[in-house]
Image (cartoon, helix red, strand yellow):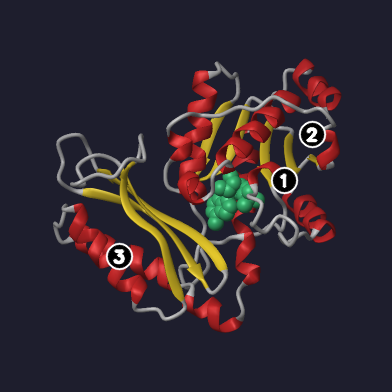
Amino acid sequence: MKEHARQARAESRIVGLVPTMGALHGGHLSLIERAKRDCSPVIASIFVNPKQFGPNEDFAKYPRSFESDCVMLEQAGVDSLFAPEPSEIYPNGFATYVNVDGLSEKLEGRSRPGHFRGVTTVVMKLLQIVQPNFAYFGRKDAQQARIITQMARDLNLDAGIVVCPLVREPDGLAMSSRNAYLNSEERKAAAVLYRALDAVRQELAAGVRDALQLQTTLRRKLDSERLARVDYAEVVDAESFAPVTRVSKPCYVVLAVFIGKTRLIDNLYIEPRSADSEELLFHF
Ligand code: AMP
């Protein structure tokens, strides 16, 4: 992979990297489409990274569909696929980790200790191997995108980190490989995440700025779904991911909710239309 990418750089081509864990869906394809607008070649990676799963998480049963993923990547016009084995990425004696302090301990990091250390370590390795001009990440994983952007800045990485919009199913459920775990009853119930975010959007549009009030609305919606169990549901600053009391700067409404045994995350990104405007823009 290093030799292959080096060759493209030697030809002064713009190399794009789209890292994934496979079980591809429309969210992944949107990243590839975006990458193809900016770059040639576009390189996708599929690697279910053991180091970002906790001991009691779903690494072993994470959905894997390598054959159909390859077909999708080819149809999407990806130039190359990097699909290493865990033993190639983490050979015996592997001992070096990258951690973004602070941000990595909040929200997802609090619920999944060590998760972001695994993410930043593998993304750093992928960026070192491919050395792309641009690497593409989805806002579906807003905290992850923020942490990777911070890592790139802190470690003077050459790759531009591009954060792309979240892609949803027709009923609003954020596309995710883990949606495959849901049975039909749970799949219906899972749309409550989007409905809860939409209820917050409506309140904001009506002028509410108090985070506690917004959070109450969020909880009430989520609690109305029998199959849903909230892990966290908060309004946080889009830079620090610390809780806010009022929505006045760019913020995320972030959710992690169990539907049955499946843990789903979702978010709504909010920003003022301009510096001196009370009007907000919403990015689902
Ligand atoms: P994953 O395979 O889940 O690790 O995701 C690989 C990349 O795709 C990450 O940058 C994700 O944020 C992004 N991604 C996953 N789901 C979506 C979605 N529904 N919309 C946009 N990007 C997504």
Is 229 left or right of 122, judged from the image as shown?
left
Q: Amino acid at mark 1?
A: Pro
Q: Nearer the viewer, residue 105 or 272?
A: 105
Q: What residue is drawn where x is 14% and y is 36%?
A: 276
For badge 2, the amino acid type reads Tyr
The residue at which mark 3 appears reads as 218
* Residue at screen point 41% across, 55% down: 267
Residue 17, quarter of the rendered image: top right
- Residue placed at 77% from the left, 28% from the top? 94
* Mark identifier at residue 90: 2
At label 3, the amino acid type is: Leu
Can you identify the residue that label 1 sits on? 50
> In the rendering, at what x and y percent does residue 160 appear?
56, 26
- Residue 151 at x, y percent in the picture: 53, 26
Residue contact between numbered discs 2 and 1, judged by CB atoms under 8 Å = yes
Q: Where 34 falls versus 226 (above or below)?
A: above
Q: What residue do we see at 34% from left, 78% from top?
A: 224
Quadrant into which the N terminus falls? top right
In-front residue for pair 43/179 = 179
Q: Secondary structure at mark 1?
A: helix
**Label ID, residue 224:** none
